[in-house]
Amino acid sequence: MRAPQLVTYAGFIAYGITVRTSNDIELDPQQAQRRQIWRRFYDEGLPARLAANSQNGRVVGVYTDYENAARGAYTITVGVEILRADTADTGLHVAQVSPGEYLRFSAYGMGPDALVAAWSEVWDFFNKNEHPLARRYERAFTADFERYGDPERISIFVAVKRKLGAGSSPHD
């Protein structure tokens, strides 16, 4: 994984299926839900169905509704980045990703193992606090997302906010 980049993102709506889980649940293979929701997303043909709206974009995994930051439950919406939701399609969830500052992490590889490794590096980045951006910004726990579409590459966008007392220079 390369060092993250600070980006300002315009925000979007994701439309898809959702599940409530936690890191503790995901560590137990008998209870883990992340892989199952992705499997369901593809088994039900949702990428093709949602892409029928010409305004729709890439496949995304959106993490919202964080309970107690990293230590509690959160909601995952697996869907498509859209400009408008088709309200006639019942049973689908809308997740809002607000405009703001994000750290974009890029990881290479495909499949669940590559994703787990990428998120591990994100956690290490914030826990070690060694990089200048990690000293200036902390996770906001509003909405984070994974964006797919490039071959062999996953982009993870983590919502951030400036740490109290952090200067404006990237080297503070």
Image (cartoon, helix red, strand yellow):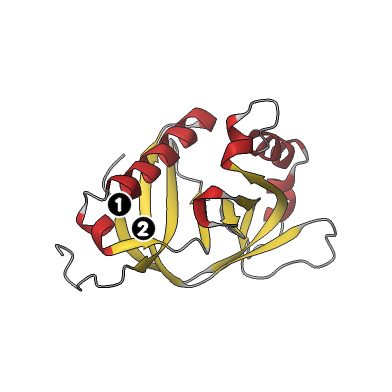
Q: Secondary structure at mark 1?
A: loop
Q: Nearer the viewer, residue 93 or 44?
A: 93
Q: Quadrant of residue 100?
A: bottom left
**Residue 30 at x, y = what percent?**
70, 26
Quarter of the image for the N terminus: give it: top left
In the image, taking residue 21 as reference, residue 62 lies left or right, namely left
The residue that disc 1 covers is 4
Q: Quadrant of residue 84?
A: bottom right
Quarter of the image for the C terminus: give it: bottom left
**Residue 108 at x, y = what percent?**
38, 36
Q: Secondary structure at mark 2?
A: strand
Q: Earlier in the sequence, mark 1 or mark 2?
A: 1
Amino acid type, callout 2: Leu
The residue that disc 2 covers is 103
Task: Identify which residue is drawn at 50% across, 57% down.
Answer: 144
Asked if labels 2 and 1 touch by Cβ distance under 8 angstroms, the answer is yes
**Residue 63 at x, y = what percent?**
57, 54
Task: Identify which residue is drawn at 70% across, 40% down.
Answer: 37
Task: Identify which residue is drawn at 67% across, 54% down.
Answer: 51
Kindly report the distance in space between the C-alpha atoms of the residues bearing marks 1 and 2: 6 Å
Q: Nearer the viewer, residue 147 or 56?
A: 147
In this view, 144 is above or below 83:
above
Q: Quadrant of residue 169?
A: bottom left
Q: Nearer the viewer, residue 161 or 77?
A: 161
Amino acid type, callout 1: Pro
In this view, 20 is above or below 31:
below
Task: Identify which residue is drawn at 57% across, 41% down.
Answer: 23
How many numbered markers are drawn? 2
